Amino acid sequence: MRWEILKLLRVQSPNYLSGEEMAARFQVSRTAVWKNVQALQAAGYRIEGSTRLGYRLLGSPDFLYPVEIVPGPATQIIAVSPQMIHHYPRVDSTNNILKELAGKGAPEGTVVVAEEQTGGRGRLGRGWDSPAGKGILLSILFRPPLAPSQTPLFTLLAAGAVAGVIKAHLPALKPGIKWPNDLLLGQRKVCGILTEMKAESDLLHYLITGIGLNVNCQEKDFPPELQQSATSLYLQNNKIAVSRQKLAAGILQEIDRLYRVFLDGGTDQIINTWKKYNITLGNRVAVRTLQGVFAGRAADLDSDGALLVEDKNGKNHRFLAGEVSLHP
Ligand code: BT5
């Protein structure tokens, strides 16, 4: 009922809505309405109460509450209702929480989102710095009918989606994707993506794509070792704060759209969306893998999203994972 009350207050804002009217609408006592208003206030909403006039909404916090980031009727699989979004003030890692939910049978399209992570994870045991209330930290559960070998495409799908949403909200910015999962603004990293899966031989149980996007981080929010390499939308947007809620809703909606394109066999479209923001292909690169470092020219992506790197004899070498340095 709390969120229903919020909806009513929002429609009515900046005017008052009487407690009596809400009590009648929900068939509860005025005390019950008042308790729900208090809960909303505790959640950060600025609601003014007047014994004579009722309540009015004066301001909303930029927290990633499910009702605020649920993308709306256009979505069909991802976060189609607020109930499919699990919001936490603080977790170790949203990917970890979603793994637990997935193990208990959570449906495809379930989302875990947090204001802060204490153990945010990158690839290969690296960390993701996740200060409270500054970024978007979310994970999405997919249960696609796929072979595990095709899953790297999901990182590209998410990277293309986030780049597109940044461009739509802040047209002056020029997001670039460094294969496979780094989103850069200028030369600095603004977003990272971590795709993990549970699979047995050829059977994929589920796939989790975790997105960490630096939205309103200031320089001082980054630890010293990231000061030169990390950035945020705020820092790139002339230090004007950006709505995390609008971006998060946009990201969920765009990933839902691209995922459906993918399910309809539109792998090319996923790759082409990624290529719109490509800053990798065409450049000299060094790819670091567990086997060593390989240098060459990033020539293309194949239909699995693997990177094809051309050696000096014109022969392509295929990488499904790895760490790319541009212009080594
Ligand atoms: C990534 O790994 O870029 C994947 C990051 C995924 C984070 C999301 S947040 C929601 C979900 N839950 C999780 O626990 N994880 C996902 P990788 O390519 O390995 O890059 C990690 C490296 O990026 C670190 O070693 C740092 O150098 C750098 N880094 C860490 N935090 C950063 C930040 N906030 N902004 C920019 N760079 C950062």
Image (tube, helix red, strand yellow):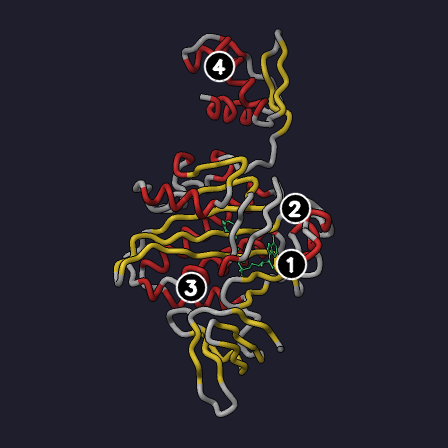
Give the residue type at disc 4: Met
The residue tagged 4 is 22
Marks 3 and 2 in Cβ contact (< 8 Å): no
Q: Is residue 267 left or right of residue 187?
A: left
- Along the line of sight, the residue nearer the viewer: 159 or 112: 112
In front: mark 1 or mark 4?
1
Ranked by sequence position, the earlier of labels 1 and 2 is: 1
Disc 1 and disc 4: Cα gap in Å? 44 Å
In front: mark 4 or mark 2?
2
Q: Residue at position x 45%, y 78% from top?
A: 308
Q: Residue at position x 32%, y 44% from top?
A: 103
Name the element at disc 3: helix
The residue tagged 1 is 173
Q: Which mark is on residue 216?
A: 2
Q: Is residue 216 left or right of residue 122?
A: right
Q: Residue at position x 26%, y 59% from top?
A: 203
Ranked by sequence position, the earlier of labels 3 and 2 is: 2
The residue tagged 3 is 270
Q: Residues within 10 Å of mark 2 (few under 14, many from 20)?
A: many
Disc 4 and disc 2: Cα gap in Å? 36 Å
Q: Position of residue 236 (x, y in %)?
A: 69, 55
In front: mark 1 or mark 2?
2
Give the residue type at disc 3: Ile
